[in-house]
């Protein structure tokens, strides 16, 4: 069963990054999130640069100079903060919305971001990813679901070896 908690008035489900793959129809990178302790899957179509950044981090590849998400991690740390969690809080007009929840001592900070950038930072800091239950419900019942029905059906039956490594 999925791990669910409430932050404020919303119910959240903890998700983990299960992999990156290319959508066979559009050849666009797809980030696959799976509910911790559950079977819910959430695919998020992302840009190629963000997919490459996430893949590099997952594969332990370090660029000779800091990449953008490495720079962001360094800035957060240099300011004495830490990433408490990533929250994917909305699905508006087919676009996912996310925020970073940072802590610096007793101070709490909230920063608006794209989900792909938030997840690229979460991978680098080993921070949890939470998705609002309402976002999951919307994603599974929206027009996105009809357009992505074949891919979603494949994902629901995918074995770990089917997800493979994303090729940079």
Image: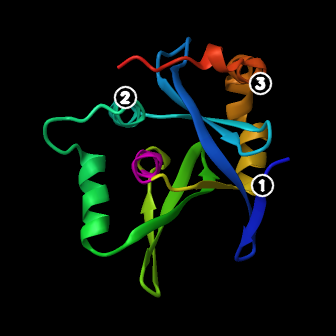
What whole-number distance in Å separates the C-alpha atoms at marks 3 and 1?
19 Å
The reply, left or right, for residue 146 in relation to residue 122 is right
Residue in the picture at 71% in, 18% down: 159
Q: Secondary structure at mark 1?
A: loop
Residue in the picture at 76% in, 65% down: 5
On the image, the x and y values in percent for residue 4 come to 78, 59
Circle 2 is placed at which residue position?
A: 48
**Could you tell which of marks 3 and 1 lies nearer the N-terminus?**
1
Can you tell which mark lies on residue 3?
1
The outermost residue toward the left is 65
What whole-number distance in Å separates the C-alpha atoms at marks 2 and 3?
24 Å
Q: Quadrant of the C terminus?
A: top left
**Could you tell which of marks 2 and 3 lies nearer the N-terminus?**
2
Q: Secondary structure at mark 2?
A: helix
Q: Are marks 1 and 2 in contact (CB under 8 Å)?
A: no
Crowding around mark 1 (Cα neighbors within 10 Å: few <14, some 14 to 19, many 20+) is few
**Could you tell which of marks 1 and 2 lies nearer the N-terminus?**
1
Front position among marks 3 and 1: 1
Circle 3 is placed at which residue position?
A: 156
Q: Secondary structure at mark 3?
A: helix
Instruction: Please provide the residue range marked out in magenta.
Output: 118-125
Which secondary structure is most common in the magenta stretch?
A: helix
On the image, the x and y values in percent for residue 12 come to 72, 60
The outermost residue toward the right is 1
Front position among marks 1 and 2: 1
Residue in the picture at 49% in, 19% down: 165
């Amino acid at each position: 069963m999925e791990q669910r908690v409430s932050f404020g008035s919303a119910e959240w489900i903890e998700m983990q990054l299960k992999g990156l793959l290319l959508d066979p129809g559009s050849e666009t990178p797809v980030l696959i999130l799976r509910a911790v302790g559950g079977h819910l899957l959430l695919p998020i179509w992302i840009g190629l640069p963000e997919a490459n950044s996430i893949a590099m981090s997952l594969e332990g590849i370090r660029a000779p100079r800091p990449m953008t998400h490495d720079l962001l991690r360094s800035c957060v740390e240099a300011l004495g903060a830490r990433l408490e969690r990533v929250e994917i809080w909305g699905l508006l007009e087919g676009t996912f919305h996310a925020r970073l929840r940072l802590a610096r001592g007793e101070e709490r900070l909230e920063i608006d971001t794209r989900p792909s950038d938030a997840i690229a930072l979460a991978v680098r800091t080993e921070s949890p990813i939470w998705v609002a239950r309402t976002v999951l419900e919307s994603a599974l019942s929206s027009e996105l679901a009809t357009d992505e029905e074949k891919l979603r059906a494949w994902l629901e039956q995918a074995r770990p070896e089917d997800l493979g490594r994303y090729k940079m």
